[in-house]
Amino acid sequence: MGTYSRKRAAERIAELARRGDDLVTFWRGSTELLAETVPHYWSPCWFTLDPASLLVTSHFQDGLPEIPAEWLAREYYDEHDVHKLADVARCAPGISTLHEATGGDPASSTRWHLNMTLGGDQEMIAALRTPTGEVWGALGLYREPRQPMFDRDDVEFVRSIAPVLAEGARRALLIGEASDPEGPQAPGLVVLREDWEVESLTPGVERLLGELPDGDWDAGRLPSSVLAVAGRALRSGEHPAHPGQVAVSRVLSRAGTWVVLHGASLVSDGSRRVAVIVEPAHPARIAPLLMSAYGLTEREQDVTRLVLQGESTSAIAQRLVVSPHTVQQHLKSIFEKTGVRSRRDLVGKVFFAHYEPRLRDNEQRALDERPLRGGPVG
């Protein structure tokens, strides 16, 4: 496919990312455009990942409503296999093929043999990473045997659209959680028209708006912080370099707690709107989970998050500015508290106890046409 056609496809994917659709609708629209630009077998495999742990929170693939349990077991328990999602997410390019990862010998990988049972020979995985470096998902593309290899143009095109796909996924998760709240700490959603009039509010958002300074929601006046993040989102939506990028702001509430505002420009049917998601600031959901479920200290939680992301002992020591011996001591304590004997067992235990239930729930949500969720199950 020519350069112009791929440029147009990238622009259309950016337009989809600005619409504010639910995640499955966004995935399906992007699937159609990918089929025109990067020929592949069957349907793309879409994942959302928890940026704090790089563990899978949802899987969507037309024709495969449930991801096979053996795929999950290989991903999180087979320490000898290659081309895992977290590995691709951590690498500098953020994209690779199974042929590259195996030095041209994909049959040496357990992953290839499992893919072949579904008819896929080649595999390309791309991390969906925002311009600020957060990984919100991954995309898997496949080709059947005897098809041309994924070439440099294929890889470069997918790499170029990955940040837009990441922003679209992040936005869909935020808006989905606000429009279909899960628990009392769920975020709220304010949708503004281009003339700054309020188009819609989700239940409970009035309470969050009332906690923000410089506003008087009882009198119908939005806080200046909400208007500011909405304005930034509208301007970013006009920028060709990063269309539809989510604007983020932290605001100190009247009660002295932090509130996070996410602004996203929406374009649908030629009209422009902006969505502002308002949520109480909280640490990555994996942190309180590790504390409540296993009693890990703050530093043990830091070490565990990096283990989940696939970092080595030396890399963890460098990130936390401690010695490798100190990291090993923390790992010994973590293993005792969680009842495992190895790093691989730790990753598997956390995933299957707290992330697989979220993934399975999201698979059912996709079938029921309900918004998908991010993060682990508490």
Image (cartoon, rainbow, N blue to C red):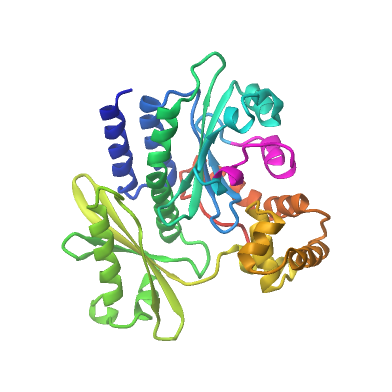
Rendered position, 41 above or below 239? above
Q: Is residue 7 left or right of residue 142?
A: left
Q: Is residue 25 visible?
A: no
- Image quarter of the N terminus: top left
Q: Which residues are magenta?
A: 66-88
- Image quarter of the C terminus: bottom right
Question: Quick check: is 81 in the magenta stretch?
Answer: yes
Q: Give the farthest residue toward the bottom.
A: 255
Q: Is residue 127 visible?
A: yes
Q: Give the farthest residue toward the left.
A: 195
Q: Please identify the quarter of the rendering in which residue 65 is found.
A: top right
Q: Give the farthest residue toward the top.
A: 146
Q: Please identify the quarter of the rendering in which residue 197 is found.
A: bottom left
Question: Quick check: is 256 in the magenta stretch?
Answer: no
Rendered position, 214 above or below 284? below
What residue do we see at 47% from left, 24% from top? 40
What residue do we see at 50% from left, 70% from top? 185
Nearest the camera: 339 or 278? 339
Rendered location of residue 63, percent (x, y): 53, 29
Rendered location of residue 41, percent (x, y): 50, 22
What residue do we see at 35% from left, 74% from top? 206
Q: Is residue 46 left or right of residue 267?
A: right
Rendered location of residue 344, percent (x, y): 75, 49
Q: Is residue 33 left or right of residue 185?
A: left
For the image, the number of numbered tags is: 0
Rendered location of residue 272, percent (x, y): 21, 53
Rendered position, 334 above or below 150? below
